Amino acid sequence: MSEFKKNPIATDEDYFKLSDNVYNNDFLHEKAKIKGSNGQEWKVIETFNADKEKVKNGLQAIAVVPADEYKPNKKHYDNVIVAFRGTEFDRFDGDKTTDVVQITLGQKKNLGVAGGKLATSFDSALEFTEKIKKTYKPTSIHTTGHSKGAAEAQYVAAEMDCYATTYAAPNIYRLLSDKAKKRVDEGVMENKVVDYTHKKDAVGNFDQFGAPMIGKQFTTKSNGTDSVLAAVFMGQHPMSTFGDMFHNNGSVRLELEPDDIIRHAKEIQKISDILSDIIRNIERFQQQEEEEVAKLKSQLKHETGPGGKYHLLEEHEVDEAIREVAKISQNGKDYFHDVQLAEELIHLLRKKQKELIHFGDDIAYAANSLRDKDNQLGTNFEGLAVR
């Protein structure tokens, strides 16, 4: 089969809603309808619930398709999304074994069972998605999930070379097969897997002790912090902290949005302006010093004339006296500051100013391009929705 395509319909918010609703047992059955973003609806075509299987490893998952394409007993769908449930702390169904043994320790086998022969939730997730592929022959399989579910989604994406959009995914690189690791190492998954997390989330930022990242990760805005989980550095881990953090077109709100970046670029411009002021002040001081020294010389030389305070001195002696106390003399002028140091400082300031201007311009250009692309994607999505 040819390479899987990216889902052309779903938005970041759709993946969020699917990742959120897979926690709800009410949607863990065929024909269940889940509301997405911008009026999009999804229909469940397949489910997996480890609680009802021989393998009690904590996996719960649903496969969904656009509701308007759903038909009972239909055997082909172009676009299928598979959503995996995350850890449920109040249940003892294998989730915590997955969290500790597979995710944290990076052990591929289920060490909680004698001989490690029980399939892990990652094994079952891959098996479930392979079944979806075989049954419905989709051109696009896109996985999603939150927390443990996000880890399973990324695992499946790397193993099957498909797309994934996840929330607060811990890194599970060490669980991958050699073939999947090679995909990651060669950058194949870089533009196929994206994870959204928060700054104050130890799970979403867990890198499996320095393992390579699967795909890309972006820090997003959070609507709040769970005070209880904050004590264990997971204050912004719950699914609820992502709620309402999306744009009208369904794209996620990043920690630094294009407009925020543009504002920072303007702040850089202000720093450049401050450097300009410093340069002007140094040059103004140099000019004023030169004028004041010339004025002083003129006054002292005037006093060397008949009846003056210094009538016993010659004018050249005034020049010599000033030259002795001056810091440096060059081109017939005397200076009371380190001219070379001042010129070097001005040169460095102008160089840094130019760098800041270029840097600010580059940032603003990139942010504007990102905003234009985001707006274009929003327009394209609206066009798809209308069709």
Image (cartoon, rainbow, N blue to C red):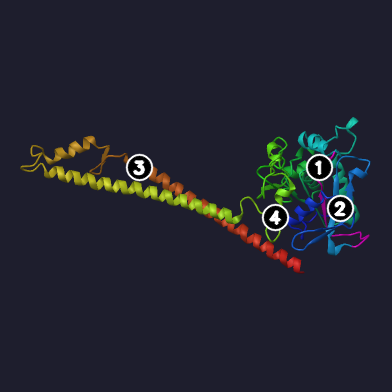
Image spot of residue 217 (x, y percent): 69, 47
The residues bearing labels 1 and 2 have C-alpha atoms spaced at a distance of: 16 Å
Mark 2 surroundings: few (<14), some (14-19) or many (≥20) residues within 10 A:
few
Return the mark for residue 88: 1
Amino acid type shown at disc 1 = Glu
In the picture, measured across the screen, residue 81 lies left or right of residue 220, that is: right
The residues bearing labels 4 and 2 have C-alpha atoms spaced at a distance of: 22 Å
Please state which of residues 264 and 354 is positioned toward the viewer in this rendering: 264
First-in-chain label (2 vs 3): 2
> How many marks overall?
4
Image spot of residue 128 (x, y percent): 88, 48
The residues bearing labels 3 and 4 have C-alpha atoms spaced at a distance of: 54 Å
| Figure check: 356 above or below 104 | below
Image spot of residue 110 (x, y percent): 86, 35
Amino acid type shown at disc 4 = Asp
In the picture as drawn, the residue positioned furthest to the top comes out as: 114
What is the magenta range?
71-91
Mark 3 surroundings: few (<14), some (14-19) or many (≥20) residues within 10 A:
some
In the picture, measured across the screen, residue 346 lies left or right of residue 234, that is: left
Mark 4 surroundings: few (<14), some (14-19) or many (≥20) residues within 10 A:
some
First-in-chain label (1 vs 2): 2
- In the structure shown, which secondary structural element does the residue marked by tag 2 occupy? helix
- In the structure shown, which secondary structural element does the residue marked by tag 3 occupy? helix
The residues bearing labels 2 and 3 have C-alpha atoms spaced at a distance of: 74 Å
- Can residue 4 be seen here? The reply is yes
Q: Nearer the viewer, mark 2 or mark 3?
A: 2
Identify the residue position indicated by label 4 in the image. 244
First-in-chain label (3 vs 4): 4
In the picture as drawn, the residue positioned furthest to the bottom comes out as: 387
Return the mark for residue 26: 2
